[in-house]
């Protein structure tokens, strides 16, 4: 089914990274359309995501690892549209070897509301040993790169007249009482000064499917 950008639709952006151990990591976040140009700008969005990864994250990726591409998939749309997928399969360009694959940069997503359901986090992919400072924390350059990637969408990315904005996605609750799916604007992104760990996508977690799509 053909798709045309519609105000209020929410789509999930998923990145795919493959590591020498065979594990796959899939960082992701959600975007809502706040203005539409009346076309399907998802391919342009996927291209912009790839460009951001190439510019900011590939230099911090083990050369034995690779960026497999991105997937733009429906989260809150009238119909279950087919995703838009890219497959550049670009190797990392860092001179360093990967940190343990459970080690991640964590970026907090801040909204105007209080409560656990209005706080979000994005776990990045595993970078290299060169991205860890002498204090054993992430170097500022890496934190700045993740900030740039996510703040691009927090500010709003306009493609072919359509504005894509970073949001927290709230899945529907079957209930009772039933609560429909919704989304909340992210007003600020904050990179965490210390490493986070995530078993999912790490070597201690379940093996994810490779390639991811």
Image (tube, rainbow, N blue to C red):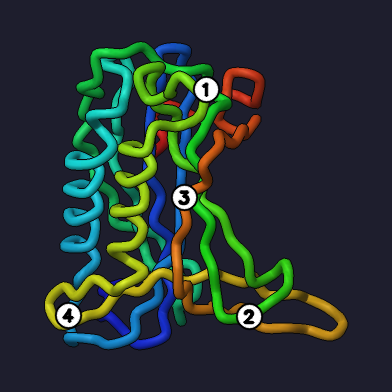
Please state if 70 lies on the left or on the right of 187 as rendered. left
Q: Which residue is mark 1?
A: 136
Rendered position, 96 above or below 171: above
Q: Which residue is mark 4?
A: 39
Q: Secondary structure at mark 4?
A: loop
Foreground mark, 1 or 3? 1
Numbered tag placed on residue 191 in the rendering: 3
Question: How far is disc 1 from disc 3 in space, using C-alphas?
Answer: 16 Å
Q: Residue at x 48, y 38 (%)?
A: 105
Residue 188: x percent and y percent?
45, 68
Question: Which residue occupies the extreme right position in the image?
Answer: 176
Q: Secondary structure at mark 3?
A: strand
Q: Which residue is mark 2?
A: 113
Q: Residues within 10 Å of mark 2 (few under 14, many from 20)?
A: few
Question: How far is disc 2 from disc 4 in space, using C-alphas?
Answer: 32 Å
Q: Nearer the viewer, residue 60 or 2?
A: 60
Residue 111: x percent and y percent?
55, 74
Rendered position, 72 above or below 181: above
Question: How far is disc 4 from disc 1 in space, using C-alphas?
Answer: 47 Å
């Amino acid at each position: 089914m053909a798709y045309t950008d519609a105000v209020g639709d929410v789509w999930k952006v998923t990145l795919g990274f493959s590591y020498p151990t065979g594990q796959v990591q899939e960082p992701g976040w959600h975007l809502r359309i706040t203005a539409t140009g009346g076309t399907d700008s998802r391919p342009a969005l996927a291209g912009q995501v790839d460009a951001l990864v190439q510019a900011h994250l590939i230099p911090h990726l083990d050369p034995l690892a690779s960026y497999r591409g991105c997937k733009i998939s429906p989260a809150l749309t009238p119909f279950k549209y087919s995703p838009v997928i890219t497959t550049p399969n670009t190797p990392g360009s860092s001179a360093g070897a990967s940190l343990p694959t459970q080690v991640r940069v964590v970026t907090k997503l801040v909204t105007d509301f209080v409560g656990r359901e209005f706080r979000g986090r994005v776990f990045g992919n595993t970078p290299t040993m060169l991205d860890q400072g002498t204090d054993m924390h992430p170097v500022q350059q890496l934190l700045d790169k993740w900030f740039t990637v996510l703040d691009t969408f927090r500010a709003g990315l306009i493609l072919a007249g359509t504005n894509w904005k970073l949001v927290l996605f709230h899945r529907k609750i079957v209930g009772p009482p039933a609560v429909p799916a919704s989304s909340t604007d992210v007003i600020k992104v904050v990179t965490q000064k210390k490493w986070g760990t995530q078993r999912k996508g790490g070597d201690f977690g379940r093996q994810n499917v490779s390639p991811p799509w």
